[in-house]
Amino acid sequence: MSIIEVNKLTKYYGKARGIVDVSFKVEEGEIFGFIGPNGAGKSTTIRLFLSLIYPTSGDSKIFGQDAIQHGPELRQQIGYLPSEVFYYERMKVLELLKYSASFYDRDCTQRMYELADIMELDLKRRIDDLSYGNKKKVGIVQGLLHQPKLIVLDEPTAGLDPLMQRNFFQLIREENERGATVFFSSHILGEVQRMCNRVAIIKEGSVIRIEDIKTMQKDNYKKIRVMGNGLETSRFEADGVTNMIQENGAVTFFYKGDINVVTKMISAQELADVTIEEPTLEEIFMHYYE
């Protein structure tokens, strides 16, 4: 079952481009990554499929229901952490979370305290006394306290120290194991690589690729590094070779194609060392952006 269905969503702000013809599906129980640099359209896409803003054209469904028509009832089952959080600053954290919990048709008290403990959040402090990182912790607890079936995270770790990031990732994995579907938007590629099953790459408002992360790493490009005396890049020029760099007596490049072709090409050289490995998600991502 598709938990999120986005169909040709387009948003213009006057003449300025937001996103254009964005389409994808997120299946039940998966952790879906959505990556792109700032300004690529990640937050706009999220706000559109959550019906927080309305599209210029296209539509979206959540749990099989139209996101605009059934928005209020759908949001009962959604936990959303925006990239930036803003609160009533004179309230105490506990007051704010109790207020948030009052919107849901269940008792969230126990889960609220459990999450506050995991994130090491002081419930007695006032919102206006909190650092940016602690306000982000409030947003995490607020988004998860009602045990949503769909968790939408937009740049969730900004402001969190490394220890809290580790706690947060473990918490999201546990929510996923409990049955929650997770939509994870980030420009930090290592996070997506560590957490997600599939990933969509968005560039200048359009999705340019959707694929399983392991497939993206293993079936597409090999990162090859060869070392030796007097190596020249011209010796490794062939169809499928890209991103070639020569430095410190080594030649590094990406290769896509029949591996026998490139190994034959390498074996014809007198080398001191050779390394063939999978590129990181960041290297693949930069390849698409370049």
Image: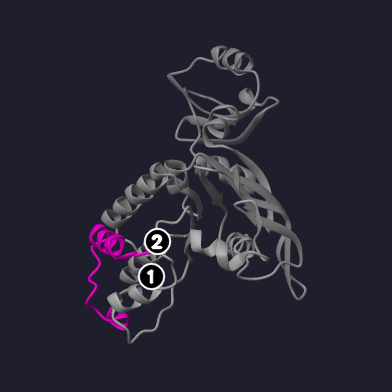
Circle 1 SS class:
helix
Task: Please give the label number shown on residue 101.
Answer: 1
Residue 165 vs residue 106, the one in the foreground: 106
The percent coordinates of residue 190 (x first, y second) are: 43, 46
> Alpha-carbon distance for marks 1 and 2?
7 Å
The location of residue 175, given as percent across then percent down, is 38, 48
Q: Does the magenta stretch include residue 116?
A: yes
Tell me how many marks there are.
2
Tags 1 and 2 touching, CB below 8 Å: yes
Nearer-the-camera pick, 170 or 100: 100
Apparent side of residue 97 relative to residue 186 in the rendered image (left or right)? left
| Position in image of residue 78 (x %, y %) | 50, 59
Query: For the magenta stretch, what is the residue range?
Result: 106-130
Residue 134, given in percent of the width and then of the height, sits at 31, 70
Amino acid type, residue under disc 2 in the picture: His
Give amino acid for label 1. Answer: Ala
For the point 35% across and 46% down, the residue is: 174
Give neighbour class at mark 1: few <14, some 14-19, many 20+ (Cα, 10 Å).
some
From the viewer's perspective, is 79 left or right of 127?
right
Res. 189 mark: none
Q: Quadrant of residue 194?
A: top left
Q: Residue furthest bottom?
A: 90
The residue pinned by badge 2 equals 146
Q: Residue at x 62, y 24 (%)?
A: 236
Residue 290 shows in this picture: no
